[in-house]
Image (tube, helix red, strand yellow):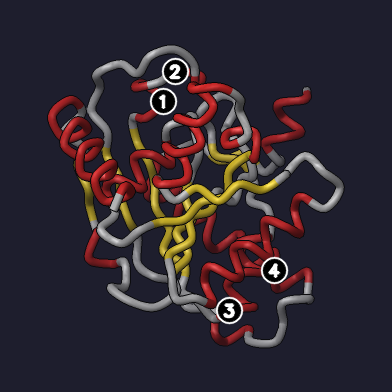
Amino acid sequence: MSRIVLKAILRFVMRVLFRPTVEGMERIPGSGPVILAGNHVTFIDSLFMVLCVKRQVFYIGKDEYVTGKGVKGRLMAWFFSTGGMIPVDRDGGHGGVAALMTGRRVLEEGKVFGIYPEGTRSPDGRLYRGRTGVARLALMTGAPVVPYALIGTDKVQPNGKGMPRISPVTIRFGEPLDFSRYEGMDRDRYVLRAVTDEVMSDVMRLSGQEYVDVYATKARAA
């Protein structure tokens, strides 16, 4: 009940302030497991997705968002948890495996799992090389992948810092991608790379971003 109330309030506020344009919502299957894979340019991307998609979307988030102390910590924990975030310790040695297994569990329960194939926020607004976790999930579960693009959220919250600004946002969904032809090949690194690149190609087309064939983490470190 708290999730429904929170989502209704935030959705109303979002529509009044930002009036987001959503294109291709009908391309998201109405039932069954679905992977939503898109670009990531600022901290609030997941919030827009959770509020705009009719089905509940689950995302992986840092466990520090729900482990804070005091009143502020409890409020943050309630906010992120009711918003569909699943906390995972991604900084540990097995963070990637934990995130992958969590996504698999969500999909096997017939739910919608949102993922950012880049693995982190873009450091400069360009689209970076996708990591193969999205491909592993698709091949392990048989779930279709719906590519999407968030356009304008970097203007709402530049660099993911400070209070959000009033600026138009567009969310654009592409056609579902079916990778059932690769069933049983989730350990083949060439197949995983091919699937991931196909997803990222659609994300690039939907977003209009310049593509960089380098991992975002390496670009950020450099």
Query: In the picture, which quadrant includes the C terminus?
Result: top right
Among numbered discs 4 and 1, the one appearing first in the sequence: 1
Mark 3 vs mark 2, foreground winner is 3
Mark 1 vs mark 3, foreground winner is 3
Cα distance in 3D space between marks 3 and 2: 35 Å
- Residue at (61% x, 45% y) in the render: 118
Among numbered discs 1 and 3, the one appearing first in the sequence: 3
Cα distance in 3D space between marks 4 and 3: 14 Å
Secondary structure under tag 3 reads helix
Give neighbour class at mark 1: few <14, some 14-19, many 20+ (Cα, 10 Å). many
* Nearer to the camera, 60 or 116: 60
Q: Amino acid at mark 2?
A: Pro
Q: Do the residues bearing badges 2 and 1 touch, measured as CB atoms within 8 Å?
A: yes
Secondary structure under tag 4 reads helix
Give neighbour class at mark 2: few <14, some 14-19, many 20+ (Cα, 10 Å). some
Q: Classify residue 194 by image quadrant.
A: bottom right
Taking the view exactly as shown, the residue that stands out farthest to the top is 162
Cα distance in 3D space between marks 1 and 3: 32 Å
* Nearer to the camera, 82 or 15: 82
Q: Classify residue 102 by image quadrant.
A: bottom right
Q: Do the residues bearing badges 2 and 4 touch, measured as CB atoms within 8 Å?
A: no
Find disc 3 in the rendering and name its residue.
141
